Image (spheres, rainbow, N blue to C red):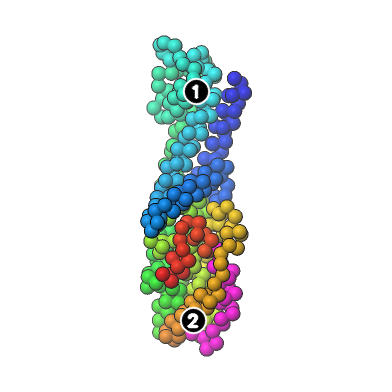
């Protein structure tokens, strides 16, 4: 019986450590059980969504809320099972009902453990020794603490989700809802003047940095997917990094070289790549996933050509746009963006705005 109680104590400590690392330590890739559990639920949901054809995206949009519910249930079940293993040997002796005989089966132990962890008390069963009274006290503190921590965690997750969606909508409207970075550059540099557009890029960099940190603190955000691809983090990263690449390779450097060398562009470049790095923590094997993305140089060149025409019409194009520089820069981040997008069920057209 002592061995059983030791196992139960180990289970309780493991789940408490997982709650601590997920909610309080709060950084991507540090949980003991939660990251694997969340990934398992998403994998199962993604396999199930394949049965729904063109409604697959709607099914996947329930992934984030479903994972939240199942993660809370997972923690509650783990703590209850661990406590039940500790309680069961004490049934009928140190822990017993106010009247009648006490069953000693594991289901009864689960009931007693669940009641002792809840804020409503221990039900009809009560402790009769100092050790079990202390156990009930600890259980009530654990239950109340975990509940309050989880509720505050959920408030923060949904607050960060709203801010992420605001960033995605800002990026989309900057491109006239096309998802094309060249269109955003043409609007930001209207009449060949980027002075006003620079402040918008600096504000965009600040919003991107906040969203990156939100994903670092709350990895659950990775699984919140919306049917509308404009809210995809992969698309946000694509548009921002494409805007940076076009600024370096296609804009007239004699007139706008200062913009390519500016702090705002550096922040967007590094912020976009750091966002990708944070998102990749949720992937089973990010390097393999990125390597499996099929390269389409003709498609990339066609995109660059269209972007150059857009910039030329706006009077922003360099006399000698650097095709090679653009292609080389894009190869450093495009496969990684598409690998993240594939995991959450978006297509290449969803991300690149080509649909």
Residue 87 position in % (x across, y down)? 52, 22
Residue 346 position in % (x across, y down)? 45, 61
Q: Answer few, some or many: residues within 10 Å of disc 1's Cα (few below 14, many 20 plus, some between 14 and 19).
A: some
Quick one: quadrant of the C terminus? bottom left
| Residue 214 colored in magenta in the image | no
**Corner quadrant of residue 120:** top left
Q: Residue at x 52, y 27 (%)?
A: 83
Q: Which residues are magenta?
A: 317-336
Q: Residue at x 53, y 77 (%)?
A: 298
**Disc 2 secondary structure class:** helix
Between marks 2 and 1, how big is the CA–CA gap?
A: 69 Å
| Residue 332 colored in magenta in the image | yes
| Residue found farthest to the bottom | 319
Q: Answer few, some or many: residues within 10 Å of disc 2's Cα (few below 14, many 20 plus, some between 14 and 19).
A: some
Name the chief secondary structure element in magenta: helix
Residue 3 position in % (x across, y down)? 62, 23
Quick one: quadrant of the N terminus? top right
Q: Residue at x 49, y 28 (%)?
A: 139
172 or 138, which lies in front? 172
Residue 106, which numbered label? 1
Q: Residue at x 44, y 53 (%)?
A: 50
Label 2: which residue? 305
Residue 99 position in % (x across, y down)? 40, 11
From what the image shows, is residue 306 above or below residue 57? below
Q: Earlier in the sequence, mark 2 or mark 1?
A: 1
Q: Looking at the image, can residue 134 be seen?
A: no
329 or 27, which lies in front? 329
**Disc 1 secondary structure class:** helix
Residue contact between numbered discs 2 and 1, judged by CB atoms under 8 Å: no
């Amino acid at each position: 019986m002592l061995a059983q109680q030791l196992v139960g104590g180990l289970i309780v400590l493991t789940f408490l450590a997982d709650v601590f690392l997920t909610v309080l330590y709060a950084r991507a890739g540090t949980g003991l059980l939660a990251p694997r559990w969340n990934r398992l639920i998403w994998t199962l949901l993604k396999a199930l969504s394949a049965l729904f054809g063109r409604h697959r995206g709607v099914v996947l949009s329930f992934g984030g809320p479903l994972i939240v519910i199942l993660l809370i249930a997972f923690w509650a079940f783990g703590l209850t099972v661990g406590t039940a293993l500790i309680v069961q040997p004490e049934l009928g002796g140190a822990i017993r009902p106010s009247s009648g005989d006490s069953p000693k089966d594991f289901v009864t132990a689960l009931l007693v453990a669940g009641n002792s962890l809840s804020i409503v008390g221990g039900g009809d069963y009560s402790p009769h020794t100092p050790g079990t009274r202390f156990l009930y006290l600890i259980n009530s503190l654990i239950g109340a603490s975990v509940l309050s921590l989880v509720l505050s965690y959920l408030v923060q997750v949904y607050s960060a989700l709203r801010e992420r969606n605001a960033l995605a909508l800002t990026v989309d409207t900057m491109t006239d809802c096309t998802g094309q970075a060249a269109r955003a550059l043409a609007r930001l540099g209207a009449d060949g003047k980027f002075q006003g557009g620079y402040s918008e890029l600096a504000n965009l960099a600040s919003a991107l940095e906040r969203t990156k940190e939100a994903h670092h603190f709350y990895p659950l955000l990775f699984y919140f997917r919306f049917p509308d691809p404009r809210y995809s983090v992969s698309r946000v990263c694509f548009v921002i990094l494409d805007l940076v690449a076009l600024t370096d390779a296609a804009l007239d450097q004699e007139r706008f070289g200062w913009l390519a060398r500016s702090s705002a562009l550096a922040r967007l470049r590094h912020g976009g790549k750091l966002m990708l790095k944070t998102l990749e923590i949720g992937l089973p094997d990010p390097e393999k996933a990125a390597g499996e993305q099929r390269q389409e140089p003709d498609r990339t060149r066609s995109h660059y050509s269209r972007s150059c025409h857009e910039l030329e019409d706006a009077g922003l194009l360099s006399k000698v746009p650097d095709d090679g520089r653009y292609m080389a820069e894009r190869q450093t981040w495009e496969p990684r963006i598409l690998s993240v997008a594939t995991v959450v069920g978006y297509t290449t057209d969803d991300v690149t705005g080509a649909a």
